[in-house]
Image (cartoon, helix red, strand yellow):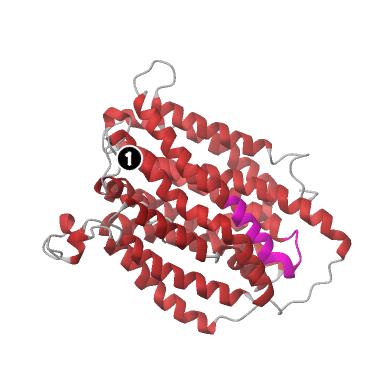
Amino acid sequence: LPVSSLFPFLYFMIRDLYIAKTVEDIGFYAGFVGASYMLGRTLTSTAWGMVADRIGRKPVIVLGLFSVILFSALFGLSVHYWMAVSTRFLLGSLNGIIGPIRAYAIEVCRPEHHAIALSLVSTAWAIGLILGPTIGGYLAQPTEKYPKLFPVDSLFGRFPYLLPCLCISVFSFPVLISCVWLPETLHNHNTDEKEDQASESLTAIFSTTEVIVEHNITSTTKNNIFSLWAESDRKYGGLSFSSEDVGQVLAITGVSILVYQTFIFPRIIRVMGPINTSRVAMSLSVVLLFTYAPITHLSRPWSSIAVNIASILKNNFLITIVTSSFILQNNSVTQDQRATANGLATTLMSFCKTFAPTGGGIVFSWAQKRQHVFFFPGDQMLFFLLAIVELVGLVWTFKPFLVVPDQFSSN
């Protein structure tokens, strides 16, 4: 929730903090806010994974939820740019929940159900993708949208972006309480893997992690650029969408991911296997990225329809790639190293995601300033560069780059 909820209103928040000297510079500063969360996660995810492998999954999950409650609210209270950056950084640093949750999903079920287990993790992410942008898009700036409920002189008039952040904190509180009944899984299963598998496992972990990392770069950059691109004026190559429009697109996308991950993805994995499934999704994703720029030439409602279709397809392709890679990765390591392996993957993903929003914001600002050039005008160049990164990821799924566990080597 705290990752996706700010995208619909981040453009307007940066504008209202008066840090950007020109409209074209908003994307530049927005990138650093998005990057600060990932920088914090980069520095601590492996350590949190090691802690989860030593003392258990449950304590790390509890602390992560507590950090969401505290720092989401503080982010909404930001009145200075650097306060916004700092609270996002602290949220990323103390929220080490990602690695332990993936390890937990694998450990609570039998091997034949690993695909559906990790699909459920992705489904939970999809629910966050539904609720987060919806909360951010509809509850940000409430004094402008709902003046009868929220007067200008109220708390939410002074802090126009507090309400969505506060809702996330309130939503997270009962989830934190429910962790009291969460069973610990660290010592529930005994594995008999031999030590001579360590070297092979380490190679497989790194090769699958590289695929995950590369596509998370594309995802983070695309999500950051998408909101900025959709909300910018048409004269700059954007769509002139409001925060509600962007929130609606992301919410519809989240519903599609929820349906896809629950009913369709497990069946595809059983038929094609994780490797071939990833390759098909990557190939289609490269083609899809070239369709974004022409959408700016469509009028309403066709532009909205086209954006929704493109967003649904792109995000479902991405979740297919990442979930397939996590299936490979989690079957490459023993239980007592699983949270650390997932933490390492999260660290590397977050390291790249740290620079992806910043780089995306810089490229977006640069693209807006060259919107009327003849060769690859700004909006076309944006999505062309994303397609190149996606193509590199496709190449990475073939030997000798990708090393897979023995049970998938025939795939």
Residue 290, position in %: x, y? 47, 30
When asked about the image quadrant of residue 366, the answer is: top left
Residue 240, visible in the rendered structure: yes
- State the residue at coordinates (49%, 64%): 124
Toward the top, the furthest residue is: 374
Q: Is residue 307 visible?
A: no
Residue at left offset 60%, top offset 81%: 183
- Residue under the point 48% across and 42% down: 221
Viewer-proximal residue, 15 or 401? 15
323 versus 52 height, above or below? above
Which residue extends farthest bottom? Answer: 181
Q: Amino acid at mark 1?
A: Ile
| Quadrant of the image occupied by residue 167 | bottom left
Which quadrant of the rendered structure holds the N terminus?
bottom left
In the visual, does 268 lie left or right of 6?
A: right
Q: What is the magenta segment's predominant secondary structure?
A: helix
* Nearest to the observer: residue 88 or residue 164: 88
Circle 1 residue: 26
Nearest the eye: 5 or 270? 5
Measured from the top left, where is residue 50 in percent x and y?
67, 67
Q: Residues within 10 Å of mark 1 (few under 14, many from 20)?
A: many
Q: How many numbered marks have been drawn onto this rendered protein structure?
A: 1
Q: Secondary structure at mark 1?
A: helix
The residue sitting at 22% across, 56% down in the picture is: 141
Q: Is residue 340 magenta?
A: yes
Relative height, residue 233 to residue 322 (above, below): above
Q: Position of residue 38 (x, y in %)?
A: 50, 53
Q: Which residues are magenta?
A: 331-349
253 falls in the magenta region: no
